[in-house]
Image (tube, helix red, strand yellow):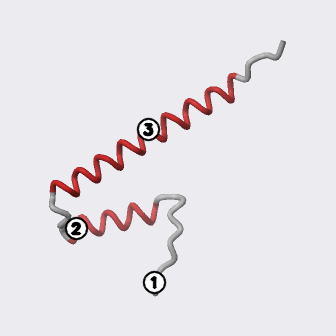
Amino acid sequence: MAKPNYQYEKRQRDLAKKQKQEEKRRQKLAAKAAEEGGAASPEDASDDTAEAAATPGNETAPDA
């Protein structure tokens, strides 16, 4: 009988948990943007761009 691979199971649980947290974060950001009517102050826009640049996996090419 094969023995269970607990490390694999734990990794899968952790990945699912992170995915769920990320989805909740996106929903909160979408709700906040909808609440503000989509109009963000320049201060908020600079925070969003800094966060997007620091986020791994965000590999959009710069326009310049």
**Residue furthest to the left:** 36
Amino acid of disc 2:
Glu
Disc 2 residue crowd, few under 14, some 14–19, many 20+, Cα 10 Å: few
Quarter of the image containing the N terminus?
top right
The percent coordinates of residue 5 (x first, y second) are 73, 23
Q: Secondary structure at mark 1?
A: loop
Alpha carbons under labels 1 and 2: distance apart: 22 Å
Q: Which residue is mark 2?
A: 43
Q: Amino acid at mark 1?
A: Asp
Residue at 48 percent of width and 79 percent of height: 62
Closer to the camera in the image, 23 or 47: 23
Q: Which residue is mark 1?
A: 63
Residue 45's quadrant in the figure? bottom left
- Above or below, 31 against 15 in this view is below
Q: In this image, 32 relative to 58: left or right?
A: left
Question: Where does label 3 land, which residue?
Answer: 20
Q: Is residue 4 above or below residue 28?
A: above
